[in-house]
Image (cartoon, grey):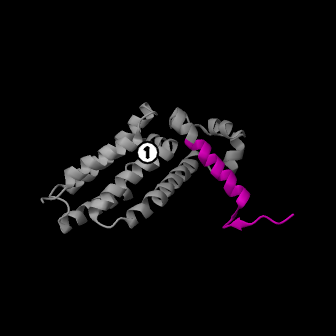
Amino acid sequence: MRPESSTGDRTFTEQARRRQFVDCAIEVIAEHGFAQASLARIAAKAGTSKGVISYHFRDKDELIEQVLLDIYAGMAGFIGPRMAAAGSAAEKLESFLESNLEYLARHRSQLLAMRRICPNLPEPEEPAPHDSAVAEFLRAGQESGEFRDFDVTVMAVTIRAALDGALDEFVARPELDLAAYRRELVTLFTHATRGNP
């Protein structure tokens, strides 16, 4: 039998086990909420005992931290390349909206879990990276003349609220046509940001 390969201090088997617990935590939080997502309930979802999770994660806080890191990494890996491929500020705005809604269509549980975790965390001292990125391409669009003069903070917050609202609507109505929803958001913010002809 070949010896196990490892990355860092963890074997592939250990990494796979941690991955399983993260995935189970996401499902439990999405289904039951943050407060009800005990290690015992997550262990039951994984078909194991709480002690096995405790072997891999110091406590629930460490597990939740890994859940968020994985979700953020997944979003960045999905949305980032699409944003990088967009040329103009207007294209970046369209790509940001479309890729966020496409990610939602594919990863509903992850985003719902993140939504349920975040209110239980301390208030961040810095704006979230995605909010900073939105403000950055909005300012670039104003400087290039693609976008009209508007308050960048207000627009960035409104874009984020619209995407959060899409998640709420999708949770309430799983049959929601997200492709049509995406088209409407793109049209709405294209008109909201468009510069003078």
**Residue drawn at (59%, 37%), measured in percent from left and top?**
38
Q: Within the magenta stretch, is there residue 3?
A: yes
* Residue 57 visible: no
**Residue drawn at (60%, 48%), measured in percent from left and top?**
22
- The quarter of the displayed image where residue 40 is located: top right
Q: Amino acid at mark 1?
A: Cys
Q: Position of residue 41 (x, y in %)?
A: 63, 35
Q: Position of residue 174 (x, y in %)?
A: 46, 34
On screen, residue 71 above or below 42? below
On screen, residue 23 above or below 15? above
Relative side of 8 to 88, left or right:
right
Relative side of 53 to 123, left or right:
right
**Residue drawn at (40%, 44%), measured in percent from left and top?**
179
Number of marks in the rendered image: 1
Q: Within the magenta stretch, is there residue 4?
A: yes
Q: Nearer the viewer, residue 65 or 172?
A: 172
Q: Which region shows up in magenta?
A: 1-26
Looking at the figure, which quarter contains the C terminus?
A: bottom left
SS type, badge 1: helix
* Residue 101 visible: yes
Relative side of 58 to 133, left or right:
right
Relative side of 42 to 192, left or right:
right
Q: Residues within 10 Å of mark 1 (few under 14, many from 20)?
A: few
**Residue drawn at (46%, 40%), measured in percent from left and top?**
116
**Residue that mark 1 sits on:** 118
Q: Position of residue 65 (x, y in %)?
A: 53, 51
On screen, residue 181 above or below 68? above
Q: Position of residue 1 (x, y in %)?
A: 87, 63
> Farthest residue toward the right?
1
Q: Nearer the viewer, residue 62 or 23?
A: 23
